[in-house]
Amino acid sequence: MTLDPEDSKLITLARASRTRGGSAEGAAVRDETGRTYSATDVALQALQLSAVQVAVAMAVSSGARSLEAAALVTAADGPSAADEAVARELGVKALLVAGPDGTPRS
């Protein structure tokens, strides 16, 4: 699978966040102005958020109105239905998914 360089950058940002935080997931999104946001999952007793949910929340709270792309790096088989739904709600047609080594899966 050949990715656009900007989409490859999202996977790189998601991988870096995942590695830096020692988290199960890393995600990155690009908004309509080209700004990027990366995040990891949050796994607290009182709060559970996926990496995609955190990255989208960061973008929206920073003023993004839509997203051009979103990427998830995970060892899991794929994104959850909730991750796909939140990305789709902001205009992402297909959530990019890559393994921990950065190899795209979809």
Image (cartoon, rainbow, N blue to C red):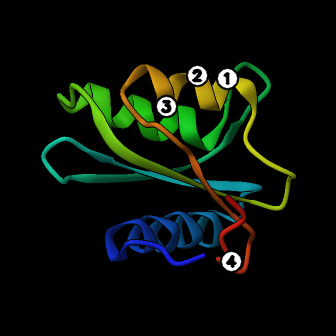
The N terminus lies in which quarter of the figure?
bottom right
Q: According to the image, label 3 marks what residue?
A: 87
Of the residues under marks 1 and 3, which one precedes in the sequence? 1
Which amino acid lies under the numbered mark 4 shown in the image of this protein?
Thr
Of the residues under marks 2 and 4, which one precedes in the sequence? 2
Which amino acid lies under the numbered mark 3 shown in the image of this protein?
Ala
Disc sitting over residue 103 in the figure: 4
Of the residues under marks 4 and 1, which one precedes in the sequence? 1
Q: Does dot 4 land on a helix, a strand or a loop?
A: loop
User: Is there a contact, CB below 8 Å, between mark 3 and mark 2?
Assistant: yes
Q: Quadrant of residue 103?
A: bottom right
Disc sitting over residue 82 in the figure: 1
Q: CA distance from mark 4 to mark 1?
A: 23 Å
**Is residue 106 or residue 12 the one in the foreground?**
106
**Is residue 2 or residue 55 the one in the foreground?**
2
Where is residue 6? Give x, y as percent: 32, 69
Q: According to the image, label 2 marks what residue?
A: 85
Where is residue 99? Give x, y as percent: 75, 69
- Position of residue 46 in the picture relative to residue 13 (left or right): right
**Is residue 104 or residue 24 the one in the foreground?**
104
Q: Is residue 82 above or below residue 54?
A: above
The C terminus lies in which quarter of the figure?
bottom right
Q: Is residue 29 above or below residue 9?
A: above
Where is residue 61? Give x, y as percent: 27, 26
User: Is there a contact, CB below 8 Å, between mark 3 and mark 4?
Assistant: no
Which amino acid lies under the numbered mark 2 shown in the image of this protein?
Ala
Disc sitting over residue 33 in the figure: none
Which amino acid lies under the numbered mark 1 shown in the image of this protein?
Ala
User: Is there a contact, CB below 8 Å, between mark 1 and mark 3?
Assistant: no
Q: CA distance from mark 2 to mark 1?
A: 5 Å
